[in-house]
Image (tube, rainbow, N blue to C red):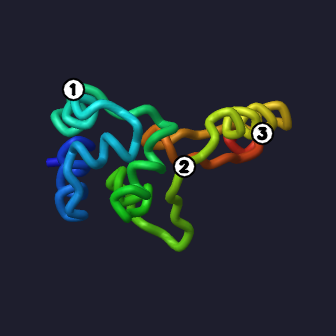
Amino acid sequence: MVESFGDRLKELRKSAGVTQSKLAETLGVHLQTVSKWERGVCEPDLSVLGEIASSLGVTLEKLLGQKEGECTYAGAFDAAELGKALAAALSSGFVLFVRSGVRLASAPASAASG
């Protein structure tokens, strides 16, 4: 059985010794929001995932239940800058593949279709 994001978040939060209240305060969200994430009622916005991982002292890959590789990602990112980078990649003929809603890989359009 695949572990849900909420279950993983709760486990990582407890392992880090962080309360729901403290995590909520650090992220600038309501306590109920963290509770909803952990119960699977909803999931956090993509732009806050890096901050959650950083607050818990884990990589983004670990937070998302992905295999950790040589290149890991942690911390906050600017969603507007990410959008600009994606738009630039698309306008230059690249097709983007999204995995788990977060990890991005790109390939030239000709390679992706063939």
Q: Is residue 13 left or right of residue 25?
A: left
Where residue 89 is drawn, which disc sits there?
A: 3
Q: Amino acid at mark 1?
A: Val
Circle 3: element type: helix
Disc 1 from disc 3: Cα separation: 34 Å
Q: Which of 110/64 is in front?
A: 64
Where residue 76 is drawn, which disc sits there?
A: 2
**Which quarter of the figure has residue 62?**
bottom left
Residue sitting at the far right: 92
Q: Which of 92/113 is in front?
A: 92
| First in sequence: mark 1 vs mark 3 | 1
User: Where in the figure is residue 56, as x and y percent of width and height?
Assistant: 34, 59
| First in sequence: mark 1 vs mark 2 | 1
Q: Nearer the viewer, mark 3 or mark 2?
A: 2
User: Where in the figure is residue 90, as x and y percent of width and height?
Assistant: 76, 33
Q: Residues within 10 Å of mark 2 (few under 14, many from 20)?
A: some
User: Where in the figure is residue 68, as x and y percent of width and height?
Assistant: 42, 66
Q: Residues within 10 Å of mark 1 (few under 14, many from 20)?
A: few
Disc 1 from disc 2: Cα separation: 23 Å
Where residue 41 is drawn, which disc sits there?
A: 1
